[in-house]
Amino acid sequence: MNDESLQNTSEQAITPEKLNYLKELTQHYYNIDSLAKYMDVYRISKNDPEDFWNTIAERNFEWRKKWDSVLKWNPKKAEVTWFEGAQLNITENAIDRHLETRGNKTAIIWEPNDPEEKTLYISYNELSKRVNKMANVLKKNGIKKGDRVCIYLPMIPELAIATLACARIGAVHSVVFAGFSALALSSRINDSECKMLITADGSYRGSKSINLKGIVDEAMGDTPSIECVLVVKQTSSDIEMVKDRDIWLHDELNQVDDKCEAEVMDAEDTLFILYTSGSTGTPKGMVHTTAGYMVYTAFSFKNVFQYQENDVYWCTADIGWITGHSYIVYGPLLNGATTLMFEGVPSYPDYGRFWEIVEKHKVNQFYTAPTAIRALAKQDVEFVDKHDISSLKVLGTVGEPINEEAWNWYYENIGKRKCPIVDTWWQTETGGIMISPIPFVTPTKPTFATLPLPGIQPSLMDDKGEELKGNSVSGKLCIKHPWPSMARTVYGNHQRYIDTYFSAFENLYFTGDGALRDEVGYYRITGRVDDVIIVSGHNLGTAPIEDAINEHPAVAESAIVGFAHKVKGNALAGFVILKNEGESRDKQNLSKEINQLISSKIGPIAKLDRIHFVSGLPKTRSGKIMRRIMRKISSNEGDQIGDISTLLDPDIVEEIKEKVQPFL
Ligand code: WTA
């Protein structure tokens, strides 16, 4: 099970008989059901990755045309193609091919925000009709292959249907999480010059009703590429429809046919763009392409969740994030699964809502984030115990490191000590799960993502750029060999893709995460090693938040850091230097204004929990802000900040300590 033994065995010669036997095994990759089989499959994937993916792709998907080459890889230019020459449409694999055998099977269960409202059960037949109709609406409104369509919708069925409709006609979807502000929305629309926006009149989240269309109207003031806004009626709230721009989806649907020929796509045609925060600058539009993404999300879904034909699978993420793309929509549907979509929040009408849904739909696989687990663990265990959740077989977690306490609570109270927890490590950039236990196969260990999936070759690097060999080491997490679902570029800026991911270490993909490999070869992700902070599972870059704060007229300069928070994992603390005129202002009001500014520029998720007004920031002589010092002080580790003699003004550290002290 350890990485070294995997490595060593993979380098041993494999006899032709053994190879044939192993190839037969991969045919049944849909069921890696023992550790021995995992080891064998992993070994072939490492020994000959191209042959491995060739077999998987050939035997488990429908292609309009087969590929000419499995992989082309130019590390210097960070250019990669998988299955070049192949033609396909991902919706034919996610929908059409199931119709004969699974037409009446439920594809999507939609659970509304309000438990009194009606649950929807959308069969594969119905999903097919709805996706085809929506695709025809897009076409009727001028959307063609390659056009970018922005989708800004709450967790309603139309969100999944719109993404699939784009894929049906070869349009590129760019889903923006519906919690983002008008400015965050417009900047994403402008970056990829979307031609259409699909949104709703409003949305429900718990007891709140959100005026989504109002946010859209504000964003539309500055989005010249948008020709048409397609509006879903969801809350029936009183909204303004702008003439020659806004159209109701239901009116359009009445005018189109429910059959739409799937566009034949090349393997490397773009399927979607999804934005993720970087440590600096604007968000990066990660570009994912068709064939490799399809192969890898299907493969990883099946193995990580061990989905069986009649299971009900539920991932609580929002489709606005990569987890929702890969493991609510594409991965499950490619496997003909029943996938549950939930419109609401875990606390409404009370903290038992998740478990009520598990009971109601007899959910078998449940996939959520550590921040949700911690929030639920704080509540009375009664909220869990009053529901029969015995249908659960596999529990998953994603988005940030899970602490041991939360892991144990999840294992005991939700899994009743019988459900394995799959702690899945991956990223928007990786497209699919990279390191994770396979349930009932890989022995789990709290806080460890354990072992790489077949086809994934992690490596740990030290600061000198040397690979750390062997076990019991920790370093920067990189990936050695390309894998099919890796992002191909940053939209419109390939240089940024190279600089961010392929320049830290030669020929390696650098993840931005730190990790350790324990004595048996298990991986534990320790957290970001760059200036990205993960708050409640959402990646936030320090730079855009600081830019927002600095726009306040009373602010001269600012720096933000993350500090440990019991529920959110990390929370944000801002250190703000005021201009002279700001000094006399009421600090409570100023703090409020700063948070309002952040909310409007980025979204409420980026709000600061603490704001400290200081007279200076700890900087090196070359002017670099030492966020590490503020992070340590904010996390009550002020005694561990080490040598500060290289600072331009070491005295500032004392002032910062005094300011932070009352919050600790
Ligand atoms: C972090 C989410 C520890 C990590 C799919 C990564 C994790 C970033 C885990 C990507 C995990 C994700 N354990 N850390 N199981 N899963 N992360 O792009 O820092 O929203 O780089 O993708 O989340 O976040 P993203």
Image (cartoon, rainbow, N blue to C red):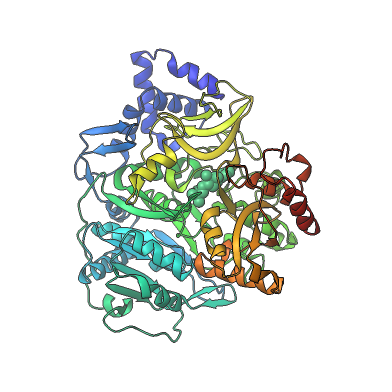
Q: How many numbered discs?
A: 0
- What is the x, y in percent for residue 595? 61, 68
- What is the x, y in percent for residue 462? 56, 28
Q: Is residue 188 above or below residue 295?
A: below
- What is the x, y in percent for residue 29? 41, 35
131, 527: nearer the viewer: 527
Residue 364 can be seen in this image: no
253, 276: nearer the viewer: 276
- What is the x, y in percent for residue 297? 40, 45
Q: Which quadrant is home to the N terminus?
A: top right
313 with respect to 88 (left or right): right
Q: In which image quadrant can residue 489 be found?
A: top left
Q: Is residue 426 above or below residue 125?
A: above
507, 314: nearer the viewer: 507
Residue 64 can be seen in this image: yes
450, 458: nearer the viewer: 458
Q: Which quadrant is home to the C terminus?
A: bottom right
292 with respect to 565 (left or right): left
Q: In which image quadrant can residue 147 be found?
A: bottom left
Q: In which image quadrant can residue 429 be found?
A: top left
